[in-house]
Image (spheres, grey):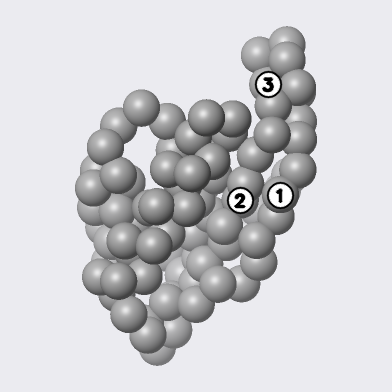
Amino acid sequence: MTLPPNVKIIDVTRKPVSDYVFDAVVTFNQGVDELIIKGRGDYISKAVDVYRVLSERLGDTIEVVKIEIGSEKFRGRRRSYIMIRIKRKY
């Protein structure tokens, strides 16, 4: 997947949800316009939680561009994933 230079991926794994929300807010404050929250396997629900908390915190200043659900080879195994692409509204 080729991304434009002004898009960042936040890969959700073991850290608490609040850490990913903080990373997203800092990323937006640094001038990045679009952000992808990605969760694989057991972390799919945590990625959705990150978006939900971020949406509660930032309200109408963000919007969902696209939600993609699929599977990919990851470390030799096929893993399901979710990618939530959001952008900042001005």
Which comes before the other along the chain, label 3 or label 2? Answer: 3
Distance of label 1 from label 3 (alpha carbons): 15 Å
Residue 53: image location, x then y, percent: 31, 61
**Tag 3 secondary structure:** strand
Above or below for 40 versus 86: above
Which comes before the other along the chain, label 1 or label 2? Answer: 1
Which comes before the other along the chain, label 1 or label 3? Answer: 1
**Tag 2 secondary structure:** strand
Image quarter (top left, top right, bottom left or bottom right) of the N terminus: top right
Question: According to the image, label 2 marks what residue?
Answer: 83
The residue type indicated by label 1 comes to Ile
Badge 3 density bin: few <14, some 14–19, many ≥20, Cα 10 Å: few
Badge 2 density bin: few <14, some 14–19, many ≥20, Cα 10 Å: many
Image quarter (top left, top right, bottom left or bottom right) of the C terminus: bottom left
Question: According to the image, label 1 marks what residue?
Answer: 69
Distance of label 3 from label 2 (alpha carbons): 15 Å
Distance of label 1 from label 2 (alpha carbons): 7 Å
Question: According to the image, label 3 marks what residue?
Answer: 74
Above or below for 44 versus 79: below
Residue 38, image quadrant: top right
Residue 60: image location, x then y, percent: 37, 85
**Tag 1 secondary structure:** strand
Residue located 61% across and 51% down the image: 83
The residue type indicated by label 2 comes to Met
Pointer 1 and pointer 2: residues touching (CB < 8 Å)? yes
